[in-house]
Each structure stands twice: as structure tokens, then as C-alpha cells.
Image (spheres, rainbow, N blue to C red):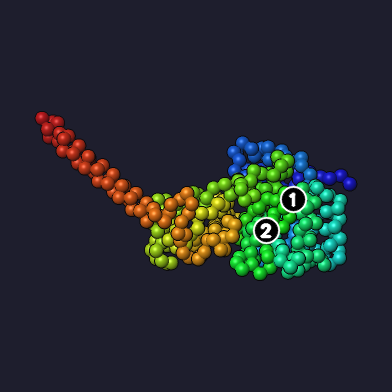
Amino acid sequence: MREYSVGEILRERGVSRRDFLKFCSAMTAAMALPVTFAPKVAQALDEVKRPPLVWLEFQDCAGDTEALLRSANPTVGEIVLDILSVDYHETIMAAAGHQAEAALEKTITDYRGKYLCVVEGSIPMRDGGVYGCVGGKSHLDRARQVCGGALATIAVGTCASFGGIPAAVPNPTGAVGVKEAVPGATVINLPGCPVNADNLTATVVHYLVFGKIPALDGHGRPLFAYGKRIHDNCERRPHFDAGQYVEQWGDDGHRKGFCLYRMGCKGPATFHNCPTQRYNDKTSWPVGSGHGCAGCSEPAFWDTMGPLYKRLPNVPGFGIEHTADKIGIGLAAGAATAFAVHGALNAIRRDKEPSDENREG
């Protein structure tokens, strides 16, 4: 049977060229590429065949699947039916039991080295991996079997990337991320609680367009999504620079959208594109809705970023503990001085300028 390209399938399903190009532009922006790359993205998706994909769930809350189901660029229906051939996903697939397991076995056997694997949830390692089991196999054995034979594995969410909350001290199940459980696998980490589905789509589109995984940082995260600190792109950054902070939940500064650093925001120590990609059809994100960043895209965030509502004592390379209280004051004082000097100079200038009467004389 002939395999159809993504573009052909989209046209068959009635997706207009206009909407297709809008999607390509959105993905180009998500991948932090110049807008001039949008035609190349469109051309590649016009020609590329759908890659088979299997989605595994381990120790998780299903939050990443929920994020997928509510994705906007594109909708989950477009992801499942058009861009990807999702052959196995326990939560959304129609098959169950032996039928579901047979679908998984067929994909990983027929397409060995060619399928993509998405993993949601951490993998318990303690006591031989007995703390998690699906279809008669431990999560550890399943991960080694499926991730080991995949073209690439995308770890969605912080649990799959770094172990997440299940790995927090004392970590009773020995929970770890995919890369630690399957060291030989090619793993792309997309941490966050939950993952931003746009980043997942953009990662897949990057592979379809360029034929390789995106450039990664030291934690295995795509640079296009995790290359900048939240603090650097935050819409409240001007208030930080001006020394305007929320001092108490619900105070006047909170209502005015002031900086949340003193309320425990971990944006200065967190790398993620939340301020630009946002969630819920790009409508908002935690800081935009009035809550500080929890640092959830960082390794061991639950242990290292807490307490949640206490500011970090020290951020490497930021010196915030020593300067945060003074930066705004200094800037405000400097601005006040500049305005005062500007006013004084104007006054002196006015004094020196001849009056209208003198001009006429």
C-alpha cells in the first residue's frame, strides 16, 4: 500500500493551504528559526512520510497526555491522524489488552530503528523495577526494549526527563529519567509539568524537516525551547529592573503585575520558553496568571527549587540575593536623578533664554 505524505493527507482531510502554512509558520517560530524557514518547513511536510510513533506511560499523572489532548498547534486529531502515525498509546488507543500489546510488538519489530518513541513518566529502578508494570513487563524492561530500538526517544515531562517528583528525596521506587534507565538510547528531553505540546510537535517537525534531532543543551533539552532563561523573556522583567515587586499575594503590586521574585519565582534559574510559547492555545502561563515559576523544567527541581514560595538564596551567574533588592532601588534612584538633572538643565536653559519681550526689543 502506498504511503502518503503529510501534505497529501492534510489535503485529503480538507485542511486548507492557508491553515497548513499558518501551522508551518507557528512551528518555525516554535523552533526559534527565522521566518524565512517557513517555506522550507512547508515543503518538507509536503513530501515527508508519516513516521510511526509509540507512546509509553510509566510513573506519571497523565498530565502530558492531557496536554497533548488540549494542544492547539496542531490539534490532537491532526497530530494523531495527519502528522504522526500513533500506533500505540495506552490512554487514547481503541485497542486494549493483548490486542494493544500486539500493536506495539508489530511496530517495534517491523520498524526497528525507524519509529519514534515518546515516554511519559519516570522509570522505577529499585528492586529490579517491580514498582511499575504494564502487560506483564516492568517499566524498566519495556523501556529498554522499546527505547533501545527507536530512532529517537522523546521524554515528555519532567518525570520522564529527570525522574521528576517520583525521584524526589527519599525516592522510594528508585525513579529515574529515560536516559539514566536506557543509557544507550538517543533521548531528547522535553521537561515541564506538563510538557508544552507545541514543543513536542516542533521537535517532531524538526526531525521531519531536517532529518536529525535538534541541537541539545547539557541536559538533553532542545536549545530552541530551553536555550534561554524564563527571567530573560518574562513579561514582568521590566518590573524587576525597576525594583517593583509583589510583597504579598493580592497586594497592589500583585494586581499591577509586578515581579514575583520575592514570592518565590524561580524564573532566574529556569530555562524554558514558557513566556513565548505559553499554554492553553498560547493564552497564558503560570507567571502570566499571577503565580511564580516553580522551576519544573530543571533537574531535581522538587528538591533544589524549594520551598515553593521562598526565593532562591543564590542563583549561579545571577548574584540575585545580593543585588535584587538594590537593582531596582539603584535604577529608580538613577532614573530620578536623571529626571532631576534633566529638569534642572531645562530650568537653567529657560533662565538663559531671552523672554519674548526681550526678543521683541
Identify whether 246 is placed above or below 237.
Answer: below
Q: Is residue 84 visible?
A: no
Query: Which residue lies at the image location 61% right of the left edge and 40% below the top edge?
Result: 33
Location of the C terminus (image quadrant): top left
What secondary structure is marked by label 1?
Answer: loop
Query: Which residue lies at the image location 80% right of the left edge and 47% below the top edge?
Result: 114
Crowding at dot 2, Cα within 10 Å, few <14 / some 14-19 / many 20+, comes out as many
Tag 2 or tag 1, which sits nearer the N-term? 2
Q: Is residue 38 visible?
A: yes
The image quadrant that residue 254 belongs to is: bottom left
The image quadrant that residue 249 belongs to is: bottom left
Q: Can you give x and y, in whole percent of width and height, for residue 175 in the image?
A: 67, 64
Identify whether 255 is placed above or below 199.
Answer: below
Q: Amino acid at mark 2?
A: Gly
Residue of label 2? 177
In 3D space, how far apart are the residues under numbered discs 1 and 2 (Cα atoms)?
A: 13 Å
Query: Which residue lies at the image location 67% right of the left edge and 48% below the top edge?
Result: 203
Q: Can you give x and y, in whole percent of width and height, for residue 237 in the image?
A: 44, 52
Q: Amino acid at mark 1?
A: Gly
Residue 69 numbered mark, or none? none
Q: Do the CB atoms of the residues marked 1 and 2 lie less than 8 Å apart?
A: no
Q: Nearer the viewer, mark 1 or mark 2?
A: 1
**Could you tell whether 222 is left or right of 150 in the image?**
left
What secondary structure is marked by label 2?
Answer: loop
Residue of label 1? 184
